[in-house]
Image (spheres, rainbow, N blue to C red):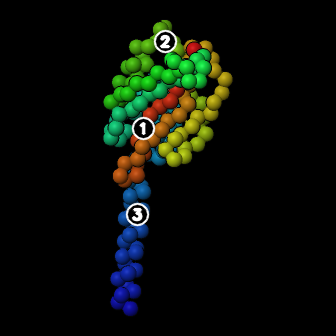
């Protein structure tokens, strides 16, 4: 009987610790992806730095929709230490507030990749395509990379 009680307490303790670990993350993958979409569209990516786990750099990859697959110039890839730095880079590339920025509805987040709905591309617009996430030891998601399609 005493062994049963000790084992029961250990099992309950394990589940209590597991439940605490699961709720310690500030945001889910879906919430992070939606935050990126809103901030990207509003041209305020830097506002997400305070809420993001800064465990890695962020890669931004822009696909040129007018270049054939595999051809030179299809992708522009840059790595940043913060989303504010990425936002500054986007701003420096603008001419008369163009290209515009768009996000479409989030389709799903699976295995660290959040995919947004693909729709028709307009000239002088950037479209959020994917947000990939990494996970801390505590299994909390953080932004790893952002993929964008340039409608040119």
Please report contact status of discs 1 and 3: CB closer than 8 Å, yes or no.
Answer: no
The first of marks 1 and 3 along the sequence is 3
Of residues 45 and 142, the one nearer the viewer is 142
The first of marks 2 and 3 along the sequence is 3
81 up-or-down from 11: above or below: above
* 142 on left or right of 72: left
For the image shown, how many numbered marks are present on the structure? 3
Quadrant holding the N terminus = bottom left
Q: Quadrant of residue 58?
A: top left
Residue indicated by mark 3: 18
Quadrant holding the C terminus = top right
Residue situated furthest top in the rendering: 96
Residue indicated by mark 2: 97
Q: Secondary structure at mark 1?
A: strand
Distance from the alpha carbon under mark 1 to that under mark 2: 26 Å
* Residue 122 visible within the image: yes
What residue do we see at 44% from left, 13% from top?
Answer: 93
The first of marks 1 and 2 along the sequence is 2
What residue do we see at 53% from left, 23% from top?
Answer: 63
Mark sitting on residue 74 = none
């Amino acid at each position: 009987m005493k062994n049963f009680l000790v084992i029961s307490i250990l099992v309950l303790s394990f589940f209590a610790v597991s439940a605490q670990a699961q709720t310690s993350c500030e945001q889910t993958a879906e919430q992070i992806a939606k935050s990126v979409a809103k901030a990207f569209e509003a041209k305020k990516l830097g506002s997400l730095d305070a809420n993001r786990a800064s465990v890695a750099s962020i890669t931004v990859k822009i696909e040129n929709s007018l270049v054939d697959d595999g051809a030179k110039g299809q992708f522009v890839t840059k790595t940043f230490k913060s989303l504010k730095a990425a936002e500054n880079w986007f701003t420096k590339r603008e001419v008369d507030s163009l290209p515009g920025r768009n996000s479409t509805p989030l389709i799903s987040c699976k295995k660290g990749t959040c995919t947004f709905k693909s729709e028709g591309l307009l000239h002088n617009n950037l479209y959020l395509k994917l947000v990939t996430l990494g996970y801390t030891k505590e299994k909390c998601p953080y932004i790893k990379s952002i993929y964008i399609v340039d409608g040119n």
